[in-house]
Amino acid sequence: MSSLPSRVDIHEEGPREGFQIEPVGFSIADRAALVEALADAGLHQIQVASFVNPKRVPQMADAAELFAAIRRREGVRYTGLWLNEQGFDRACATASVDLVGALYFYASDAFSRMNNGVSAEAHAQSQRQWLARYREAGLPVESAYVMTAFGCHVEGEVSEARLEQSLQFLAQLQQEEGVTVPHVYLADTVGMANPVSVARRVSLARRVLPGARIGLHLHDTRGIGMANALAALQQGVDLFDASIAGLGGCPFSGGSHGSSSGNICTEDLAFLCAELGIETGLNLDKLIQAARLAERIIGRRLDGRLMHSGLPTRQAAVNP
């Protein structure tokens, strides 16, 4: 078992993850205010919206207008998600988007077919075209995601051998294309991880990709998302995606509100890190305020535990 990291970076996904599965109708002003509150709390990378088919995800149809409404804070990256070339073109045409080159792979063939209409292998091969497109745009590839790395609600168990195939393909792709992907995320897309599988699969990823910084994108579908985060911390993982107040979920995976549960909760993860003596650079009190703002905007009780505890925090983080 590795020692705990001294510092953890948390990338915020709530504004995109959360509102993509809610009904259409939340104002740009409210969503911009939430993004600004998150930046004020010290988050240095915030995924604001996705550039996807507005017929399939109408909640994100106004992505460009949302980006334009945000009062930007120096030192913060305001990123977007795209899944095809049309989405990438829209992101490129939006002046206030901080573009981050990313590749996507699937450990579950069934989920790839459901999400993209092609096999996991075909989708992996298509990432070569994305590498070419990013080169044309002068955009370095910063991260790669292996989705359904811990299991799939359609296919069921995803073996470590199947995950290793995806990771080996990424290793081979980097060698053949002469690129280095510095950050590789294992994504628990539908919330099927457990602490043992987290420890084992993080170790597997490090064996296959020894030069990469391994991150985790965890969901809390079955209520053990924070236990999985602790298991990752105990393996020295220092890079996480999270979502303020536990907002969000995958809109194509079934479950409540037509989705899996949201990402692990940003303020709860930051609190766990603070209790363990791990720096995040985040202000817990401001994170709680942002979580309560998200709850007021959404209009119902959200899943964050810390903001509902009524207990004081020991502010061990840096005040931005």
Image: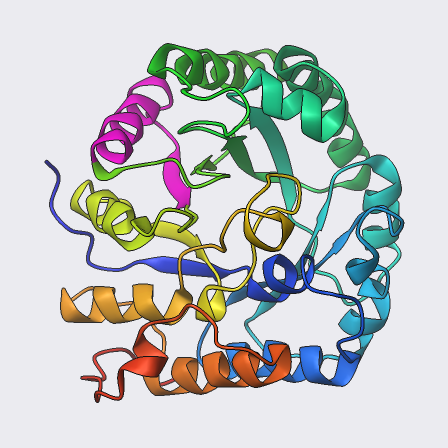
Question: What's drawn in magenta, residue-wise?
Answer: 196-217
- Position of residue 223 relative to residue 115, above or below, is below
Q: Residue at x 64, y 23 (%)?
A: 112
Q: Is residue 99 left or right of residue 241?
A: right
**Whole-percent x and y of residue 218?**
41, 46
Quadrant including the C terminus: bottom left
Position of the N terminus by quadrant: top left
User: Can residue 54 be seen at all in this image of the molecule?
Assistant: yes
Drawn side of residue 251 relative to residue 13, left or right? right
Residue 203 lies within the magenta run:
yes
Residue 73 visible here: no
Q: In the image shown, does 293 or 2 lie closer to the viewer?
A: 293
Q: Nearer the viewer, residue 185 or 198?
A: 198
Above or below, 274 against 73 in this view is: above
Looking at the image, residue 2 sits to the left or right of residue 60; the answer is: left
Identity of the residue drawn at 66% across and 59% down:
79
Q: Quadrant of residue 114?
A: top right
Based on the picture, tell me whether residue 215 belongs to the magenta stretch.
Answer: yes
Specify the quadrant of the image occupied by residue 7.
bottom left
Where is 34 relative to 154, above or below? Answer: below
Residue at image coords 46%, 54%: 263
Q: Give 109 or 44, whichever is nearer the viewer.
A: 109
Q: Position of residue 143 (x, y in %)?
A: 54, 39
